[in-house]
Image: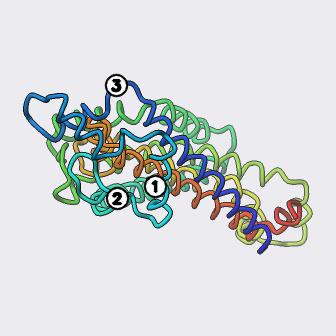
């Protein structure tokens, strides 16, 4: 197990290193003059070449690529994202403030998705091919096909504009989080329902189950001790990936619902060409993916030790 975790950590370091280099390179070689965009975001006045050159020198855009990269990477290894090129404030406090809105929203969406998908998938597998099973598959397929931004707009139109039950924009109260969380949760529920259903049906089709049933094992014990562990691996995979993707999906949903968070933080940084802010969001998102995948691999080995033995 220790060797396996060591290999996973090494893989995580390689992925994060590649992400850091690629992110910096893409932003560095983006079209346009970032110094001019930063100066326009800083000063609401007619800009001169002297002002733009001063900004370029101040934020390090007059250095070559590798000099600028190592100057950024050194503090990053200490989890220091530097200072905003526009406001001059440290990046980390502003990034943390944005995350305090995005992470709870993503977790709420995941909870809603799990609360909807788990009972729906279990009920659908009671009679495979039956009316409820076909309805569950149809609803899940429809939910997977609807883009989050379109679903969010429909929910705003129905519950905020037509019915007036919930607020559409902002994040002042808990009620402001309901529509964004439901928008994220329904998308998660669509994916989880199909995977949980497929996992349960596959587990029930295993050839050893009839022999276990003939020994007098109850249906509940059979589901708990044999069907659930067998069906858990694909569910754990998707569950972990959905948690990481929700951070990315929340970015779009926050923009639609006018919420503060990583979405607003990232959009404002892109418009102003605030490279440290953009790089911080990308690195944190990549780190979330890496950590989630690392946890998934460890959980695999707990659920089924044969996976660790195969990779040893």
Q: Which mark is residue 99?
A: 2
Q: Secondary structure at mark 2?
A: helix
- The Cα–Cα distance between marks 1 and 2, rounded to whole angstroms, is 10 Å
Residues under numbered marks 1 and 2 in contact, where contact means CB atoms less than 8 Å apart = yes
- The Cα–Cα distance between marks 3 and 1, rounded to whole angstroms, is 26 Å
Residues under numbered marks 3 and 1 in contact, where contact means CB atoms less than 8 Å apart = no
Left or right: 311 as drawn, with respect to 145: right
Query: Colour scheme used in the picture?
Result: rainbow
Q: Is residue 281 above or below residue 160?
A: below
Residue at image location 53% in from the left, 38% down from the top:
140
Camera-nearest residue between 119 and 68: 68
Residue at the top extreme, as displayed: 31
Locate residue 10: give its quadrant: bottom right
Camera-nearest residue between 258 and 290: 290
- Looking at marks 1 and 2 on the same chain, the residue that comes earlier in the sequence is marked by 2
Q: What residue is shown with label 3? A: 32
Q: Secondary structure at mark 3?
A: loop
Residue at image location 68% in from the left, 66% down from the top:
299
- The Cα–Cα distance between marks 2 and 3, rounded to whole angstroms, is 29 Å
Quadrant of the frame with the C terminus: bottom right
Residue at image location 23% in from the left, 57% down from the top:
89
* Few, some or many residues within 10 Å of mark 1 (<14, 14–19, 20+): some
Q: Is residue 58 above or below residue 44?
A: below
């Amino acid at each position: 197990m220790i060797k396996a975790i060591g290999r996973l950590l090494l893989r995580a370091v390689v992925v994060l290193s590649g992400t850091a280099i690629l992110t910096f390179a893409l932003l560095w070689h983006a079209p346009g003059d970032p110094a001019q965009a930063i100066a326009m975001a800083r000063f609401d006045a007619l800009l001169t070449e002297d002002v733009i050159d001063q900004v370029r020198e101040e934020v390090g855009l007059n250095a070559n690529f590798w000099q600028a990269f190592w100057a950024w990477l050194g503090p990053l290894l200490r989890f220091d994202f530097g200072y905003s090129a526009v406001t001059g404030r440290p990046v980390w406090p502003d990034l943390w403030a944005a995350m305090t809105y995005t992470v709870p929203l993503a977790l709420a969406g995941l909870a809603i998705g799990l609360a909807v998908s788990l009972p729906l998938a279990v009920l659908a597998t009671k009679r495979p091919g039956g009316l409820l099973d076909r309805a569950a598959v149809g609803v899940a397929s429809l939910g997977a096909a609807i883009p989050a931004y379109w679903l969010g707009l429909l929910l705003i139109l129905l519950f905020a504009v037509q019915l007036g039950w919930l607020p559409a924009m902002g994040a002042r109260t808990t009620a402001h989080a309901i529509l964004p969380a439901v928008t994220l949760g329904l998308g998660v529920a669509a994916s989880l329902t199909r995977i949980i259903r497929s996992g349960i049906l596959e587990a029930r089709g295993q050839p050893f189950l009839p022999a276990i049933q003939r020994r007098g094992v109850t249906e509940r014990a059979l589901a708990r001790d044999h069907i659930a562990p067998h069906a858990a691996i694909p569910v754990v995979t998707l569950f972990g990936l959905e948690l990481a993707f929700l951070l990315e999906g929340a970015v779009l949903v926050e923009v639609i619902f006018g919420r503060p968070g990583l979405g607003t933080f990232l959009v404002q940084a892109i418009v102003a060409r605030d490279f440290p802010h953009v790089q911080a969001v990308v690195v944190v998102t990549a780190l979330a993916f890496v950590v989630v995948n690392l946890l998934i691999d460890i959980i695999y080995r707990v659920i089924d030790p044969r996976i660790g033995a195969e990779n040893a």
